[in-house]
Amino acid sequence: MTTFLISGGRGLIGKSLSKMLKIQGHKVYKLTRRPKRKGHIYWDPEKQSIEGKHLHEIDVIINLAGANIGEKKWSNKRKVELVNSRVNSIHFLKKCAVNMPELKYFISASGINCYGYNSPQEMTEKDSYGDDFLSTLVKEWETASHSFEDICPVGILRIAMVVDKRGGALDKIMKTIKFGLGSPLGDGQQYVPWVHIKDLCRMFVHCIEHKKEGVFNAANGYLSNKEFMKTISKKMKKPFFLPAVPRRVLSLVLGEMSTMLTESLKVSNDKIKKTGFTFTHQDFDAAMAEVVKKDH
């Protein structure tokens, strides 16, 4: 049995991952500002405060903390919040690690949007960071995670759009399509990387079990936005005939955040597969079929 400490454990990924770990017989503690049940540990990174009674048990830290990228427009103030909620929480965890003598591994979420956009080639983990806001955010996020390397091995998963109807971007898209409003976004030709929640959780477990070090693209694959939206509409048995939503409209509504929907990104998953990891969902059609099936 391994004892885990998860920051951001009450989010979409944290809930699924902690459930998987518990089924496997592990002990899971979740860091939260509002501890409500057994297994919750109070912390507040801004106030540098944490409940310390279980820290000596921790074998592995899973860091998922960070303000929701898509929740609000990216004002300058919001950008600072997005960065600080990720970077400062890791620095605080590092301070807390002095009270974790059993700590053997640290693994953190990161973003697939680290490469910039619109390259015609598949991006690999060897490619450099882009120069837009999200690339800068991810660079700072990952630099903070690497600070744990003087304590234990460090793994980082660059996560694509998560395919799970219980939250995240896909949940919002499905709600729109439910009302018959499915259509391509922008020109529809831009590529969208995706990862099924089950495969993402399995990837975390795989890296933890084998203490994999370094960064890995966490994506089953990618497809055009038009095919992405069309597949979701088809699986939900909803119409898909409306004209594409112009990029300028998305930019007006969402501001700079619209780049996440309108710009293209192709990523390779060869590195994680070469470690022996295999994906359960080989294509987006099959992944969406499972998501929609759960809805009935």
Image (spheres, grey):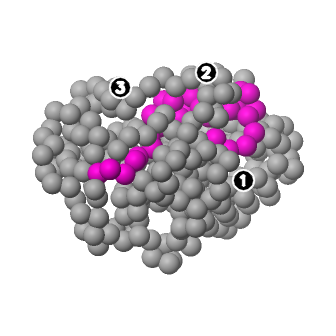
Foreground disc of the pair 1, 3: 3
Going 51% across and 77% down the picture, which residue do you hit?
Answer: 77
Q: Residues within 10 Å of mark 1 (few under 14, many from 20)?
A: many
Q: Quadrant of the C terminus?
A: top left
Foreground disc of the pair 2, 1: 1
Going 87% across and 50% down the picture, which residue do you hit?
Answer: 150
- In the picture shown, does residue 220 fall above or below 90? above
Which of the pair 89/31 is nearer the observer? 89
Name the amino acid type tagged 3: Ala
Going 36% across and 71% down the picture, which residue do you hit?
Answer: 255
Badge 3 marks a residue whose secondary structure is: helix
Q: Quadrant of the N terminus?
A: top right
What is the residue that sits farthest to the bottom in this orientation? Answer: 76
Q: Percent from the top left, x then y, of residue 284?
A: 37, 32
Which of the pair 191/36 is nearer the observer? 191
Badge 1 marks a residue whose secondary structure is: helix
- In the picture shown, does residue 107 fall above or below 25? below
Name the amino acid type tagged 2: Gln
- Residue placed under numbered mark 3 in the picture: 286
Residue contact at pointers 1 and 3, CB within 8 angstroms: no
- Residue placed under numbered mark 2 in the picture: 24
Q: Is residue 138 left or right of residue 255?
A: right
In this picture, which residue range is highlighted in magenta? 188-216
